[in-house]
Amino acid sequence: MANSPERDFVLKTVRERGIHFLRFWFTDVLGTLKSFAVTPAELESTFDEGVGFDGSSIQGFVPIEESDMVAFPDPSTFQVLPWRPKDNGVARMFCDIRNPDGSAFDGDSRLALRRVLDKAADMGYSMNIGAEMEYFYFKDDTSTEPIDKGGYFDLTSLDNAHDLRRDTVLTLEKMGIPVEYSHHEAAPSQQEVDLRYSDPMSMADAVMTFRLVAKEIAIQQGVHASFMPQPINGESGSGMHLHQSLFDEEGNNAFFDPDDPDGHNLSLVAKRYLAGILKYAPEYTIVTNQYVNSYKRLVHGTSTPVYTNWSECDRSTMVRIPMYKPGKESATRIEIRSPDPTANPYLAFAATLAAGLKGIEDGLELSAPCSVVEIEGMSDAERAEHKVQSLPRDLGEAISCFESSELMREVLGEHIHRFYVENKKREWESYCTYVSDWELKRYLQKL
């Protein structure tokens, strides 16, 4: 790697602040954060040569007979870890993963996202994305006993988590990750922290960092932070709502049209993008909602989506057009409400952006907005006419939609696509053969 301002900044900061450990972060294909540390003496050479590691031990990477992989740190992601001691401090950098011959590794999640961003650039667009992160605090990691009885926006003694949220937000800001909002969510012990929009790669890095920071701060206070999508029966689940917008080469919001004849202030580009998001949702849902438990959240009778519909105000639709600032160009965007916070953010962003770009490429026509109540009153023929599909009802259905998707195979690459299918089939088969407490309580005595 040639000298760069970012590289020089890292080397200087390490010297001046007495950083003793450099943690190299990357994710496996499922989005689990991985890390190893190097000392400052080795840092400069790692920019040029990378650091070798055993790829066969990482989910979705390579078999043991092809185990040698190399991690190259990205100096633009350097941040000191505020929760570590100042003396002999610790910093982190995200890494790109390569093969020993220096070629890009097809199982690298950052590479998958970078390919889609390059395609967007070729089409004349850049992207902004913001993430609303919902999660729970529990008294420990062995039960779902809440630490408070608060509800949506509560700021009373009912909300015992406000100090935890505050410390989490302050830590994120020390790491250069701005936060727009934080508040108590609807369920007991449920929280939301909204990360301020940025480019998709930076936002994916921020989501990975946020999940770790939330858990670290919770551990310091003797509680457990959980991003499980649906941990408590009968309560709201946790989502990762994605706010997306495209900008053209002149910096204009390509989603905004003050003269939209339909009155939504959406441009033709935005409508085609949204049509792509909706059309391909069943195919990418396994990426945005990747676990058995994810589908316990996407159910009827809640504020979470079950159909590929959209509206301006209805928060049970899959996509919403936020109208906090109607008519303001910079605020015009779409909000995808189906993803959950366990998703690998690099792949979730890649899949949804690619679906939207496909809608633009193919000139897809956007269906009329409709609510869940309207959809449930339609016949199958009427739903087809309105281009409304059902989201996968469980992981098994999501696997089928994803496995046959040519778009997802193209976007994620054969390596990641094949791993997802194989890994998720094993998870689904394991779940289907497990006898649950629900079954024992319902059937054991009377059957």
Image (tube, rainbow, N blue to C red):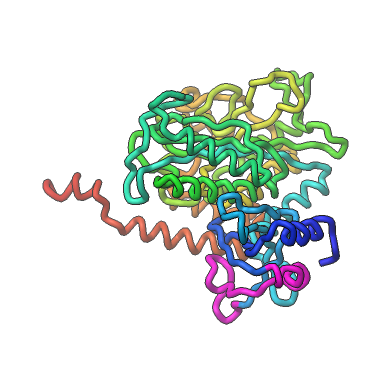
The image shows residue 393 at horizontal and vertical percentages of 44, 43
The image shows residue 134 at horizontal and vertical percentages of 50, 38
Give the position of the N terminus as an image quadrant. Answer: bottom right
Q: Is residue 385 visible?
A: no
At 71% across and 41% down in the image, what residue appears? 198
Write down the region rendered in magenta.
Answer: 40-67
Instruction: Tell me: 400 left or right of 131.
Output: left
Decide: is 366 above or below 210. above
Q: Residue furthest right?
A: 250
Q: Is residue 292 visible?
A: yes
Q: Nearer the viewer, residue 228 or 252?
A: 228
The image shows residue 330 at horizontal and vertical percentages of 75, 28
Instruction: Tell me: 176 left or right of 186.
Output: right
At 72% across and 39% down in the image, what residue appears? 128
The image shows residue 287 at horizontal and vertical percentages of 55, 51
Decide: is 130 above or below 85. above
Question: Residue 62 magenta-drawn?
Answer: yes
The number of callouts visible is 0
Locate residue 233: give its quadrant: top left
Q: Nearer the viewer, residue 265 or 380?
A: 265
At 55% across and 79% down in the image, what residue appears? 64
